[in-house]
Amino acid sequence: MKARTRAVRSSRASLAAQCGRGSQSCMATLRQINCRIENWQRVWSPIHDSWSPMLNNSEMMRLAKKMHGRYGHLAEQVMNQRATENRSAGDVEAADLWTRVAAFIRAIKTTNQHRELAKSFRPAFQVAPHPYLLVSPNLVIAGANDAYVAGTGARHSDLIGCELFDAFPDNPADPNANGVKNLKTSLTRVLDAGLPDVMERQRYDIPRRDGLFEERWWMVQNLPVFDDGGRLIFVLHHVQDVTASIKSTPL
């Protein structure tokens, strides 16, 4: 108990230093957080009692969104603070839980920032005549222009915020499907090197609204998009449907 108390005091002092004592609004938020930490068992027990180390990603994301909604812009700091307190108290499983929640909160914040950045150039992107998809570094779809939606038969509302390969999985009826593998490899090259990557002609069937898949062939380019500070914030995924020419070519 003494170890936990020392950890709480230390982590509070660290948070206060990060907020800055001159910021009244930030300190007010910190006081609210401190009040909640005083009632630690009430906040923690229901989660601890039901928690399993085998929480899947969907459950972790729900918990992260709940904590993000509760603590706002300080959520990641608060989760790391909780992890420190639990680790000092010898509760390694709880510490690992809050560390994972902090990582998911960081992903939520990054995705939200990317969506806001996408809005700044969306008008030109949206009316471009060629199909484009805007993908964040964590492979979440941040934008899809009208040409892309028309070419794939998808809906904007089904794409934005969806993980790329959840929206466009491999065709389960094709045992030789390798679209996900090859596209992921190309995107990884762009993210690692910060350079454009052109894929070989690729079969990548697309899901129809009736649940079946339609055969499609594509030429694909993936290009890095940087902010003013030189940080890679998106990959611009450009496709050209070459299905008709492939099918019309004699074997």
Image (cartoon, rainbow, N blue to C red):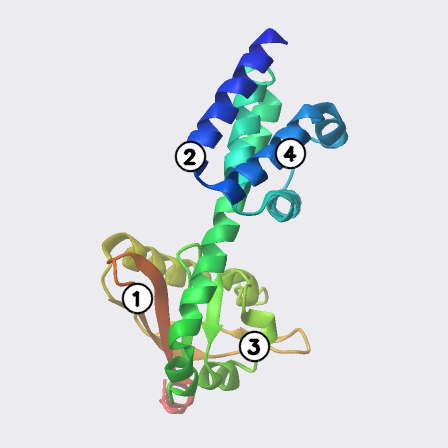
Identify the residue at horizontal 62%, vertical 25% (top origin).
94
4 or 1: mark nearer the eye: 1
Of callouts 3 and 2, the N-terminal one: 2
Q: In the rendered image, which quarter is residue 63 located in?
A: top right
Sooner in the amino-acid sequence: mark 4 or mark 1: 4
Find disc 2 in the rendering and name its residue: 18
Q: Secondary structure at mark 4?
A: loop
Say which amino acid is labelled 4. Answer: Met
Q: Position of residue 188 (x, y in %)?
A: 34, 55
Residue bearing the label numbered 4: 54
The amino acid type, in three-letter code, at marker 2 is Gln
> x%, y% of residue 175?
52, 62
- Earlier sequence position, callout 4 versus callout 2: 2
Instruction: For marks 4 and 3, give the one nearer the viewer.
Output: 3
Gap in Å between the C-alphas at discs 4 and 2? 33 Å
Q: Which residue is mark 3?
A: 156
Q: Nearer the viewer, residue 172 or 86?
A: 86
Where 188 sits versus 205, above or below? Answer: above
Q: Nearer the viewer, mark 3 or mark 2?
A: 2
Give the residue type at disc 3: His
Within 10 angstroms of label 3, few (less than 14), some, or many (20 or more) residues? some
